[in-house]
Image: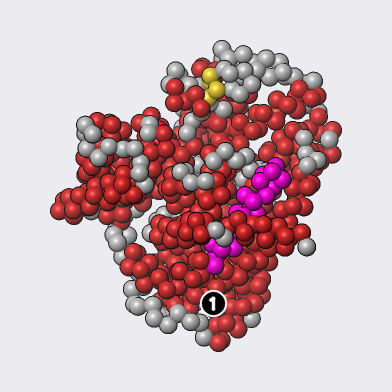
Amino acid sequence: MDILQNLATGFSAALSLQNLIFALIGCLLGTLIGVLPGIGPVATIAMLLPVTYGLSPLAALVMLAGIYYGAQYGGSTTAILVNMPGEPSSVVTCLDGHQMARQGRAGPALATTALGSFFAGCVGTLVVAGFAPILAAFSEKFTSVEYFSLMVLGLLSAVVMAQGSLITAIAMIFVGLLFGLSGTDVNTGTARYTFGVSELFDGIGFLPLVMGLFGLNEVMSNLELPSQRRQIVTTKVTNLWPTRQDFREAWPAVLRGTGLGSLLGILPGGGVVLAAFASYTFEKKIAKDPSRFGRGAIEGVAGPESANNAAAQTSFIPLLTLGLPSNVVMALMMGAMIIQGIAPGAAVMERRPDLFWGMVASMWIGNLMLLVINLPLIGIWVKLLTVPYRLLYPCILLFSLIGIYTINNSTTDILMTALFVAFGYLLVKFGCEPAPMVLGFILGPLMEENLRRSMLLSGGDPMIFINRPLSLLLLLMALALVLLVALPQFRKTRETAFQE
Amino acid sequence: MVRIRSPQDLGAAVTFFVIGLAGFWFGWEYDTGTVSAMGPGYLPLVLSYALMFFGLVIGVRALTFEGPPVATIRWRSVILILLSILTFALLIRRAGLAVTVVAVAAVAALASAESKWRETIALALFLAVFSVLVFVYGLGQAISVFWGD
């Protein structure tokens, strides 16, 4: 009955009027930005992060959760109506969702997405509530040695989902780690890589880095696309409700997608993309008539959409219990928590149960709100899709810059942003994906701290990482992951998965 | 004669090597300490060496295996977007939010060949009013609307 009691704590914290309002604003803003074509959840969250800075920690986390789910849901809407995936995980939704829309069944496709996501969100919340305490208790046995190995595993698993070559992705992690070490060293007070700039004494700003590498870089790459012929389905989305047959076909797919997504979300490096792809492949495989897929099969929408939402939920587990972000979105969440003065990990659960369980509860509330507000508001979202990009990008740029500026009222932060935009642009041209770098950046200081402590403990003997069974296990898992990615067979499937 | 087989990889290699070299150049004087008591310079140096090593390995690969070329760089959008960000940094303290927004929107609009000037003026004015209302009056941010206040 612990779970129920914990959830009760959470709901009583999250259900205050103030927090509900912030959850609502978060969902609305998240959907609003997420629905704009060519803007994925990472950019959406990065753009809206500054909005949460002035709030209390719980309100900020509640709002962020709302923004995250809203962004995801908005991305699916764009995928279905415009055939433009805002993020890799809605690539799959495009396949059958857009076909449904072209057949005049956009309404049922959107409704299935919303209902499936809501169901998956409920299950995902329960999984988090049930699983997080177990993992947190387990992590109490961790010392700095195990934490270091865990971070190695976490960082290397980021490589699995990165496009491009293995060694490039690993090098990107190192770049991130090095950038993360800039600023004043906590142990000795030495200023590292600050070049006498006082704003750099606290390290390179998280927001300028993320906005430069992701948010504003997306503007650059979108500007380079030739004037797109967007195939917007502008016919009025009238009949939202799926037919009885739709329900019969979608329901089992939702169940399977939820199960698959919950499981894959927990794995480091897994997350939403893998979940969506796995679910689609699975649905296609077990279907009686696989040829329907790609031509508007409702299972092809219901399964992956449920899977990615379940995974979106459960990918919070490693972050909340171990302090380990498993993908860029989670790295953003971690950055936001650190700015709020919370170091994510098992300690939060013990010391601030209201905060931890409040956040878990707000995940569910966020999902419910999305269901309630989005279906009636579909008309507005459809209208937004028709705004041409030449009018959108100056707005995106300005709001991002104002957001970054207002945090510290610092023009240095703006100049740093410009630097990272240029750097990120080069990286993309050179085939280096910035995602592993962001993970390295956020984990850099923690990793150094744990490495120092481990070496102090062992008197400088690196064998300590191998002599401890738990640490050895984590390192072996990391090694297995790298070997898996290096295997030619896996490489091939990974490449085809990205090409689709 | 050495032939560059993969320009994209070569670009990545140079990037990594330069970052590693810079990390070493600016970081070699930090106290490294010993393995059992690491100083502030220990990990930065290790990472810098590793990056230079990665740069060399990827560089060798770029000369031995065929790879994709570097996609064309659209100078117009790159330079103008960067310029618009710099405009923001330059003006926000001096000219206040309203003027900054109009200027940034105007420079940014030039980055796209599709922008139309009438539309841009309307958008810039709308954005100026909107951001002043939302950020200064709505969210109460400490930015002046015009210079001098």
x then y, percent, for residue A307: 61, 65
In the orientation shown, which residue stands out farthest toward the left?
Answer: B118
For the C terminus of chain B, give its image quadrant: top left
Magenta stretch bounds: A346-368
Left/right of residue A233 with respect to residue A494 in the rendered view = left
- Tell me residue A399's x, y (percent): 35, 47
Residue A198 falls within the magenta-colored stretch: no
Kind of residue indicated by mark 1: Ile
In this image, A279 relative to A77: left or right?
A: right
Residue drawn at 67 percent across, 28 percent down: A449
Q: Residue at left 44%, top 18%?
A: A196
Q: Is residue B58 above or below residue B131?
A: above
User: In this view, which residue lies farthest toward the bottom?
Assistant: A244
Q: Residue at x 74, y 47 (%)?
A: A136
Say which of B48 and B39 sits in front.
B39
Q: Which residue in the protein does label 1 denote?
A: A298
Q: Position of residue B108 (x, y in %)?
A: 26, 44
Count of numbered badges drawn on the protein: 1
**Is A119 drawn above or below residue B20 in the view shown?**
below
Which residue occupies the foreground of this view, A10 or A478?
A10
Tell which subunit mark 1 falls on. A
